[in-house]
Amino acid sequence: MRWICILLPHLALDGVLRSRADPAAPLVLVGGPAQRRVLLAANPAARARGLRAGQPLAAAQAISRDFVAIDHDPAEAAGWHRFLGAWAYGFSSQVSLQYPGALLVEIGASLSLLGPWPRLEARLRRELTALGFRHRIVAAPQPAAARVLANAHDGLALPGVEAMRRALAQMPVERAGLPREVATACARMGLVRLGQVLALPRESIARRFPAEVLRHLDAVTGDRVPALESYAPPDRFDARIEFGFEVTATPALAFPLKRLTADLAAFLAGRDGGVQRFVLQLEHAGAAATEVPVGLLSTERDAAMLLEMARVRLERVPALAPVQALRLVAHELPAFVPAHRELFDERPQQTLPWPQLRERLRARLGDAAVHGLRSRADHRPERAWQPEDEAGRTPPAAASPRPGWLLARPLPLREAVAAILAGPERIESGWWDGGDVRRDYYRVATAAGPQAWAWRPAGEDGPLMLHGWFA
């Protein structure tokens, strides 16, 4: 078993920055009582102006007025933690959020599919960077050891227990995950490395420190396997971005909409699912939210497609009242079946895949303008097909070939018939519902070349009625 720890040292700050159109602008997170507001975190632009975590807000404002202060919301940070847990679930079924600001992921069973480790590590870093979260990654045989080592390392991958113990022995005591008072006591005793603490007799550690110190050391070294709480992704997606100001134009919603649909795509990829319907909620001050439903004919999870469908639906909202927040909610998350792709795609570069073109047409023309077809158990051609909301079903094979273009109603066949290719196929049905038909159908070649599907009343020799064309 092999574990990785993905440490997210700036989780709360990154969660705020990724929802802003200009994350490079100076920004700080503040917390504490109203009488003593303190900076909890600052982005690089704010630090360049001399702002630091732990600084009183009043002192920071005396240094610079050119920054944005955002109240720290622990619930929002916890939501980002769960979101990244759902993302990590795409790499392993054993994900734990037990440690604040960190993900523990068991990857031993995943390396055969996603490995080797350098390739998997590069993919993890690439996706985390795209999501907007700074991180450190350490791989170790034990989860607690990986978590401790991530306090001082990034990119460390330990192949075995002996290498893990050597790395742990060099860890500074203050970064070993021990309680602050224990680390301070160790420093006073001259113990600066974790290896020095581990070298002490267990009885001495038990006598000097609380019992949780020994339990922590045993978990780090692998002498005790801790029971980790496994994470399971939720059955719904609910994400919200608050602007802090009022948006009155649809184009201004493009960036938060892109971020929300990208998060939805990452969430779906993590649970190996798709989405067929979701709702955009435009929140206004003192008024009910405007809901914009987005429906797809089939399950999808491509971020670009979800963004385009949502953007087009949003553009059709007639009058946009000032918007203070944008929310995306998806309750129905069915299984996702990837579309079949050829190994060598011969489509021209400027063409769209059929699912994307279909959804684009529905978004622009309306849901009723594009639909699928479903076969019915009826021999009458006019009633053998009917529209349906969901696409992708394959109609059963007919006993005889049917034309690809069936006319809405039969018309007299005006073209000269060069030859009868097949028929007659007698269709006699519908006497019970008033739609009685008695016809002999023929597949004929016209003098101009196209092949037609035509009929005449059963048993008669009159003129043919055109009912469809074969491709």
Image (cartoon, rainbow, N blue to C red):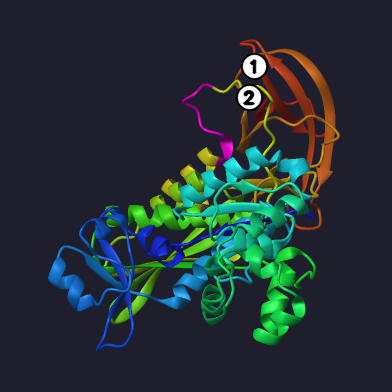
Q: Residue at x 25, y 60 (%)?
A: 46
User: Which comes before the other along the chain, label 2 or label 1?
Assistant: 2
Q: Residues within 10 Å of mark 1 (few under 14, many from 20)?
A: few
Position of 118 relative to 152 (above/below): above
Q: Residue at x 66, y 63 (%)?
A: 195
Q: Residue at x 64, y 42 (%)?
A: 120
In depth, the one of 114 and 57 nearer the eye is 57
Q: CA distance from mark 2 to mark 1?
A: 12 Å
Position of 342 relative to 119 (above/below): above
Coordinates of residue 112 in the picture (x, y in percent): 78, 41
Q: Residues within 10 Å of mark 2 (few under 14, many from 20)?
A: some
Position of 241 relative to 124 (above/below): below
Residue 274 appears in the picture as rendered? no
Mark nearer the viewer, 2 or 1: 1
Coordinates of residue 70 in the picture (x, y in percent): 30, 71
Mark seen at residue 413: 2
Side of 329 where 242 appears, left or right:
left
In depth, the one of 464 and 449 nearer the eye is 449
Q: Most extreme residue toward the front, as rendered? A: 190
Quarter of the image that includes the N terminus: bottom right
Residue 389 on the magenta segment:
no
Name the residue beneath numbered marker 1.
450
The amino acid on which the numbered mark 1 sits, given as a three-letter code, is: Pro
Q: Residue at x 32, y 69 (%)?
A: 53
Write down the region rendered in magenta: 348-355
